[in-house]
Image (tube, rainbow, N blue to C red):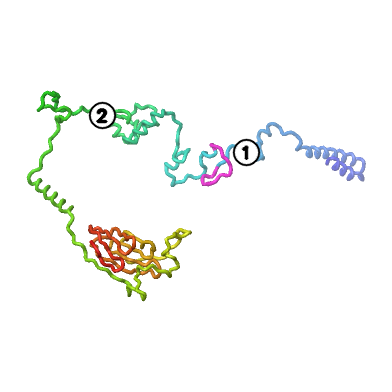
Amino acid sequence: MSAAIAALASYGGSDSDSDSGSDAEGRAGHSAQVAVGDAVLHLASVPSAQQALLPAVDSAPTVAVKEDVETGVHLDPATKEVQYNPTYDTMFAPEFGPVNPFRTQQMAAPRNMLSGYTEPAHINDFMFEQQRRTFATYGYALDPSVDNYDVSTKYIGSVEEAEKNQGLTVFETGQKKTEKRKKFKENDASNIDGFLGPWAKYIDEKDVAKPSEEEQRELDEITAKRQKKGKHEDDKPGEEKTILHVKEMYDYQGRSYLHVPQDVGVNLRSAVPPEKCYLPKKQIHVWSGHTKGVSAVRLFPLSGHLLLSCSMDCKIKLWEVYGERRCLRTFIGHSKAVRDICFNNAGSQFLSAAYDRYLKLWDTETGKCIFI
C-alpha cells in the first residue's frame, strides 16, 4: 500500500523543476511514512491503560458437556409402556413440570410399591406373628415405626382397648384364674343316706323353680294344641272317577289302547334289545296336562308304547308314546298329591300311592278303582 502511494507521488512531480522536485520528494516521503503508520496501526499492541478500559467479550455460546447431558433420562409418568430397561434412579426420579392442584397428599406421597412405601425392617418371626394375631384379635398392635416404646402413643389401632388390656398380647394371659366352684362334700361311703360323692351339688347351684298355677295351665294348653296338631285326621278316601279323552275306547277290530301297535316303524314286541343305542340329541315332544309338578313317570311293561304319570295335582294320566302322543285317560281318586305309581308285569293294572295315606289299585283299560 505504501509503495503504491510513493509511486504515485513520484510520477506526479516528474515535470517540475529540480527545486520543486526536491520539496516534493520531501513531502512525499513524509506522507509515505504517515500512510505506512496508519496501515500498520491495527497490528500494534494496545497500551495497558487502554486495554484495561475495554470489556472482555466472549462470543462463543455456552455448550453443555456431554457427561452432564447423559446423567439421566427422564420418563413421562403417563407412559404405559417403556421400550428399554431403565435404572432404579430413573424410574423413581422426581417429576418435572407444574404441580397438579388436584393431587392429594396421599397421591403425592412417595411410593416404592403399588400399595405404598415400604422400609426395610428387621423383626423376629415370632414377634411379627404375635403382633399380627394380637391386632386380629384385640384390634391393636405395637407401632413398628417407633423405636422407643416408652412413649405413650406406641400402639396403633384401638388404643383404648390396648390401655384396657394393658398392652397384653394373645400369648399372654391377662385374666386371673377363676376359682373352681365348690361342692357339698360328703365322701363318707358308710353314710348311706347322706353320701354324695361326685354327684354332690354346687354350693351356689340353684334349684329349678316350679311354674305357678297360671303358668302351668298355659303350658298345658300349649302342649294340648301341639298334640292335637300332630295327630292325623281320619280323612275318608276320595271319590274315584276316570275321564276318557279319546272318542272311542276300541277300534274297528275291538282292540283297546293296551294293544301294542305295529305301524310305528319299531318292533315293540321284540324282547331283543337294539344293537345300537344313541344319546339323545334333540327334544321330540312335550306332554302337557298336569297343573303341578310331576312326581313319577312309568312306561308300559315290555312294549313301552304307553306312558303313565302322576302329579302333585292329585291326578294320574295315561299318554301315548307313539303316533299323535295324546292323553288317553285321566284317573282321579286321591285327595292329596300322588307320590308314586307302579305297573304290574302285564300292564293291565297299576298301583298308586299318595300323601292321603291310601294305596289304590286301578284297572289300566277301564279306569276303575279295583281296591283301596
Residue at 12% in and 27% down: 195
Say what amino acid the circle numbered 2 marks.
Gln
Residue 87: say if magenta. Answer: yes
Residue type of the residue flagged with mark 1: Ala
How dense is the environment of label 2, judged by Cα within 10 Å: few (below 14), some, or many (20 and up)? few
User: Which callout, 2 or 1, points at the residue further toward the start of the chain?
Assistant: 1
Residue 208's mark? none
Most distant residue in the bottom direction: 252
Main secondary-structure element of the magenta-colored stretch: loop
Instruction: Tell me the quadrant of the picture where the N terminus can be found.
Output: top right
Quarter of the rendering containing residue 37: top right
Compared across the picture, whether 365 is left or right of 52 comes to: left
For this orientation, the residue located farthest to the left is 213
Mark 1 sits on what residue? 64
Classify 111 as above or below 368: above
Name the residue: 34% across, 71% down: 256
In space, the residues marked 2 and 1 are separated at their CA atoms by 73 Å
Q: Nearer the viewer, residue 173 or 271?
A: 271
Pick the front one: 70 or 267: 267
Give the residue number, with chain letter if any, for mark 2. Answer: 175
Q: Secondary structure at mark 2?
A: loop
- Spot occupied by residue 14 in the image (x, y as percentages of width and height): 91, 44
Q: Quadrant of the C terminus?
A: bottom left
The one of 333 and 53 positioned closer to us in this rendering: 333
